[in-house]
Amino acid sequence: MPQDSRATACTDGPAAGFGRHGLRRRPDCDCIQPVPSSSPPVRNVLTCHLPDPAATEALGRALAPALRPGMLVTLQGPLGSGKTALVRAMLHALGHQGRVRSPTYTLVEEYQLPQGPVYHFDFYRFATGSEADDAGFREHFDGRALCLVEWPEQAGAWLPPAQLAVRWLPAAEGRTLQLEAHGMALPEGLPGARNG
Ligand SMILES: Nc1ncnc2c1ncn2[C@@H]1O[C@H](COP(=O)(O)OP(=O)(O)OP(=O)(O)O)[C@@H](O)[C@H]1O
Ligand SMILES: [Mg+2]
């Protein structure tokens, strides 16, 4: 099999997943694949400490430029943790100029923005995952709209994997959030961010 000119034999032995030359040994064959140095990280985890509501707003504004049509953002945290506050800041930063109401009672609020439709869900009131499915919400997750989902744990197994999962962690003061990005790059310099 022809090899890339940059692919030098790795001497770490067949058991090693990664060679010391930045080369990856495929598990199913013996040839060596170069790993492009510009590959985006597949999974990226950050923790942000947000001392007050203004910091939550700043984080929403900072995250907004990374959001694209078709993405799913899940927001998982206790009652009153700031999920809607974060979404509100994201929507305003994306160009929405009106009010952002909590979808606690309506279950979903829809926004038509220049980038495309955005759906903001709150699944808190669903007791079982099938209720959310029966409500016909699955079709909103067809890869065309940006979906922002509070209480994703109440949706059930049909909810597709999130590109950005936001989780509120226990915090003595303010709020501490974990951001887990899959296949998307988190913006640099997010408010209150530290790795891991
Ligand atoms: N970093 C922060 N520190 C302290 N308070 C905050 C912070 N961020 C948001 N808050 C406050 O927490 C409250 C959260 O309200 P919000 O409605 O956004 O919560 P929620 O998580 O959406 O709740 P629910 O689960 O009921 O939908 C607001 O009063 C907001 O000002
Ligand atoms: Mg809310």
Image (cartoon, rainbow, N blue to C red):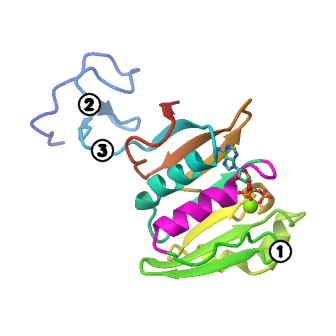
Q: Secondary structure at mark 3?
A: loop
Cα separation, mark 2 vs mark 1, equals: 52 Å
| Horizontal and vertical percent position of residue 64 | 46, 60
Query: How busy is the neighbourhood of tag 3: few (under 14 within 10 Å), some, or many (20 plus)?
Result: few
Q: Is residue 111 left or right of residue 168?
A: left
Q: Residue at x 39, y 42 (%)?
A: 41
Answer few, some or many: residues within 10 Å of disc 2's Cα (few below 14, many 20 plus, some between 14 and 19).
Answer: some
**Residues at marks 2 and 3, CA–CA distance in whole angstroms:** 13 Å
Q: Position of residue 105 (x, y in %)?
A: 83, 74
Residue, disc 2? 23
Residue range in magenta is 78-95
Badge 3 is on which residue? 39
Task: Name the residue tied to disc 1.
Answer: 105
Q: Are marks 3 and 1 in contact (CB under 8 Å)?
A: no
Taking the image as shown, residue 184 lies to the left or right of residue 29, namely right
Circle nearer the N terminus (2, 3)? 2
Q: Quadrant of the N terminus?
A: top left
